[in-house]
Amino acid sequence: MINTTRINLLPDRAIIGMVHLQPLPGSPRFAGDLNGVEQFAINDARILVAGGCHAIMIENFGDAPFHGSEVEPVTIAVMSRIVSKIVDEVARPEAIPVGVNVLRNDAAAALSIAAASGANFIRVNIHVGGMMTDQGLIEGKAADTLRLREQLGHGPDSTHPIAIFADVGVKHATPLDSEWMLEQEAQDCWNRGLADALIVSGSGTGQPTSAEDLARVRIATPHATLLVGSGTNSENLTEYLRHADGAIVGTFLKEEKDVSKKVDLSVVSKVIQAVKSTKI
């Protein structure tokens, strides 16, 4: 019998709050204070949990310009340290799932960090197919990612499964295929790439996600867990949740809506309250 089990670790209408890491050692804008970078990330994670977020995702947002597919060992080492601290000090006592995204598209590194730190899911920007990006051509490695997860002992039937959240129509990218269709990519990602959740985003960080695109992916993959990947705020949340099962929220939760600033507790609480009052 073919195993079609998917890892579902989020509640319905989940809000995943973003921890955007400041520049890490080895990246061009690293300021030389790793302890400060770590503490900033821990503080953001604590605010997200205090505000009621259902999960946290950590990514090396400050490391631009990004490597296309493989980051340097120092990035993996530092992210493992920071993610482990957040899991142990912030998330584990509250049973909050923690995710890892290694930009631009290092799924193997993300899986390795998650396995070492006790995190629960990873985000893969390009899981299937190919996209032209500002890092050049990036091709999905779903076959490698799924096999590595099994080798590490974190598949769907393990005691500590690690879910794979995969983008479709990923932001900051252009499809290579002139006949590309969002619906086909979603079906490939879900049915052939065996992702555990699909993410639909706007054109860039903080840009609104098209409600029409969400509806198209929902129709094409009716059984998939579907997440909004960008542009969510307390105003459009109700509309998004008509089609999606949850949302990843980053820029909107920051002070002055500036992704480089710390998370604003009052805004987090406002978004969570909007979720609670939404009737679908």
Image (tube, rainbow, N blue to C red):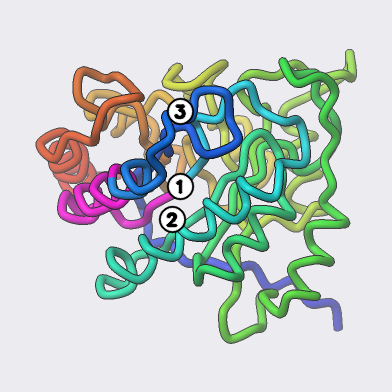
Give the quarter of the figure containing the N terminus: bottom right
Question: Magenta stretch: dominant SS?
Answer: helix
Residue 194: % across, % down: 75, 58
Query: 246 above or below 10?
Result: above
Q: Which residue is mark 3?
A: 230
Disc 3 and disc 2 in contact, CB within 8 angstroms: no
Q: Is residue 117 magenta?
A: no
Residue at 57 percent across and 40 percent down: it is 199
Disc 2 and disc 1 in contact, CB within 8 angstroms: yes
Query: 222 above or below 91?
Result: above
Q: Element at badge 1?
A: strand
The quadrant where residue 154 appears: bottom right
Residue 168: % across, % down: 67, 34
Q: Which residue is mark 1?
A: 58
Stretch in magenta: 40-57
- 152 sits to left or right of 179: left
Q: Is residue 230 visible?
A: yes
Q: How many marks?
A: 3
Few, some or many C-alpha atoms within 10 Å of disc 1 (few <14, some 14-19, many ≥20)?
Answer: many
- How far is disc 3 from disc 2 in space, using C-alphas? 24 Å
Q: Earlier in the sequence, mark 3 or mark 2?
A: 2
Residue at 85 percent across and 23 percent down: it is 137
Q: Earlier in the sequence, mark 3 or mark 1?
A: 1
Q: Which residue is mark 2?
A: 82
